[in-house]
């Protein structure tokens, strides 16, 4: 079983970034900021970029992972079965 943190990493690896809305809609992850904090503590170079969502009324952040040898090493050791996240359907 893939952890939610692994799902977030796989999503960022595939799509290059993630927002809280994407995490909920595509992964069923409701605590994205918590997983981002954990990834930073583990050494990932997570970059937060404020984005303007017209009419959203709340600040929104897009998370990306900058070039970091830690990412490639950890992702390389991820089992093949864990590289394909199971997305939830709406």
Image (cartoon, rainbow, N blue to C red):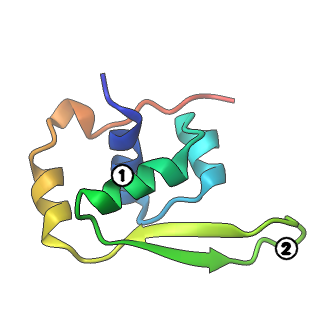
Disc 2 to disc 1, C-alpha distance? 29 Å
The C terminus appears in which quarter of the rendering? Answer: top right
Q: Is residue 68 left or right of residue 88?
A: left
Query: To which residue does mark 1 refer?
Result: 38
Query: To which residue does mark 2 refer?
Result: 54
Query: Which residue is pictured at 54% across the width and 38% down the height?
Result: 29
Percent across and percent down for residue 23 are 56, 46
Which marked residue is nearer to the observer: mark 2 or mark 1? Answer: 1
Q: How many marks overall?
A: 2
Query: Which residue is pictured at 25% across the width and 34% down the height?
Result: 82
Badge 2 crowding class, 10 Å Cα cut-off, few under 14, some 14 to 19, many 20 or more, is: few
In the foreground, 64 or 45: 45
* Mark 2 secondary-structure assignment: loop
| Position of 17 relative to 26 (above/below) | below
Percent across and percent down for residue 31 are 56, 43
Percent across and percent down for residue 21 are 66, 51
- Residue that protrudes farthest toward the front in the picture: 41
Percent across and percent down for residue 3 are 35, 31
The N terminus appears in which quarter of the rendering? Answer: top left
For residue 13, say whether it is visible: no
Res 19 quadrant in image: bottom right
| Position of 43 relative to 20 (above/below) | below
For residue 9, say whether it is visible: yes
Query: Which residue is pictured at 56% across the width and 68% down the height?
Result: 62
Question: Sequence order check: which comes first, mark 2 or mark 1?
Answer: 1
Q: Is residue 26 left or right of residue 78?
A: right
Query: Which residue is pictured at 62% across the width and 41% down the height?
Result: 24
């Amino acid at each position: 079983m893939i952890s939610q943190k692994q799902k977030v990493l796989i999503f960022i690896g595939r799509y290059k970034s993630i927002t809280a809305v994407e995490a909920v809609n595509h992964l069923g992850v409701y605590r994205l900021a918590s997983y981002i904090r954990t990834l930073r503590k583990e050494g990932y170079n997570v970059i937060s970029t404020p984005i303007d969502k017209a009419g959203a009324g709340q600040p929104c952040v897009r998370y990306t992972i900058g070039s970091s040898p830690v990412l490639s090493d950890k992702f390389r050791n991820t089992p093949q079965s864990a590289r394909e996240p199971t997305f939830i359907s709406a």
